[in-house]
Structures are given as C-alpha cells and as structure tokens.
Image: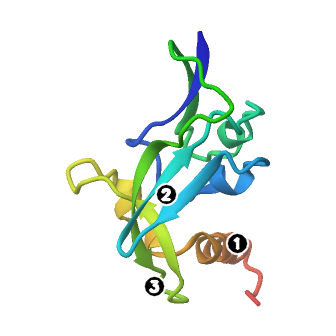
Amino acid sequence: MSKRLEIRPERCDGCIGCVRSCPTGALEVEQFEDSGRITWDAGRCIFCRRCEAVCPKDAVAFSEFDLLFGPRAARVPVMDLTVTRCSACGRPFALHGGSSETRTPAMESDRLALCPRCRQRATVQAQIAKKGEPAS
C-alpha cells in the first residue's frame, strides 16, 4: 500500500498554507480565470507531512491507497477552489470552492473575504486590540 494526500473539503477554508509549506512543490495551486485547484504530485512528495502539520483546520490527511505512484506520476487534483479578490488589498487569492450548501459558517465570515496576508494582519490587530494596545 502507498500513501495518498487528501484534503477534506468540509474543513478546508482555502488558506493554501499546505501549498506554501511544501518544500518540494508537490502541492501546487493551478489558477484559472475564476477558479483553481490544489494538485498533488506523489512523485515529488517526500511525505514530510508539513502540509498536514500547518493546516489550521485539520483538513489535510494522508490515507492508504492501493495504487503505487512512480516518479513520473501525474498531478492529482485534491481540492477545487474559487478565485476571488481580497476585500482589503484587491489581490486575487484562492478560496475553497464548495457550493453554498457545503460552506461552513466559518467560510462565510468576512474574514474569509481577505487574502491570507490580510487575514493574518487582521488577526494580529484583533489580538492587539484585545490587549488594549494601540494598533500600528
């Protein structure tokens, strides 16, 4: 048996932290006009599991799989995404592409209208505000 990467769509919020953490480029975002997808190349994956460790929503997992992948294995789509523009900076970014029926309350929040960089900035500013310190 071989390992296969899976992303649980009901948990993924499209932050693409898994893609950014991949040291080999086995995880990539293919971006189109208004959609995209995360793909995984088993032949490039070293199974370091960084993607699994950095996922804040516990959406990334490895499972047993019958098919053995070779070094020239094709990229496997693991998550469909919708491309949108950040409401703060206007930068395009990939958002989880589930239908409105499968979106979780967390995915509908205003925070997810922000790209990962602006989302992180907003989180830090909120934490500073909770402490009563002036935001810079």
Give the residue displayed 35% in from the left and 73% down from the top: 34
Give the residue displayed 55% in from the left and 89% down from the top: 89
Quadrant in which the C terminus is drawn? bottom right
Q: Residue 112: give x, y in percent of width and height.
A: 46, 68
Q: Could you tell which of marks 2 and 3 lies nearer the N-terminus?
A: 2
Question: Of the residues tagged 2 and 3, which is closer to the observer?
Answer: 2
Tell me which corner region of the image, top left, top right, bottom left or bottom right, holds residue 110.
bottom left
- Location of mark 3 (residue): 87
Is 7 on the left or on the right of 126, as rendered? left
Q: Nearer the viewer, residue 90 or 25?
A: 25
Give the residue displayed 74% in from the left and 40% down from the top: 50
Q: Nearer the viewer, residue 1 or 101?
A: 1
Name the kind of residue labelled 2 in the image. Gly
* Cα–Cα span, label 3 and label 1: 17 Å
Name the kind of residue labelled 3 in the image. Ser
Name the kind of residue labelled 1 in the image. Val
Count residues near mark 2 (Cα–Cα under 10 Å), then give few for <14, some for 14-19, many for 20+: many
Q: Could you tell which of marks 2 and 1 lies nearer the N-terminus?
A: 2
Q: Could you tell which of marks 3 and 1 lies nearer the N-terminus?
A: 3
Q: Which mark is residue 124?
A: 1
Q: Nearer the viewer, residue 28 or 14?
A: 28
Quadrant in which the N terminus is drawn? top right
Label 3–label 1 contact, CB within 8 A:
no
Is 122 on the left or on the right of 44, as rendered? left
Element on which disc 1 rests: helix
Element on which disc 3 rests: loop
Q: Residue 10: give x, y in percent of width and height.
A: 38, 41
Tell me which corner region of the image, top left, top right, bottom left or bottom right, holds residue 20.
bottom right
Give the residue displayed 41% in from the left and 75% down from the top: 84
Q: Which mark is residue 6?
A: none
Q: Residue 98: give x, y in percent of width and height.
A: 31, 53
- Location of mark 2 (residue): 14
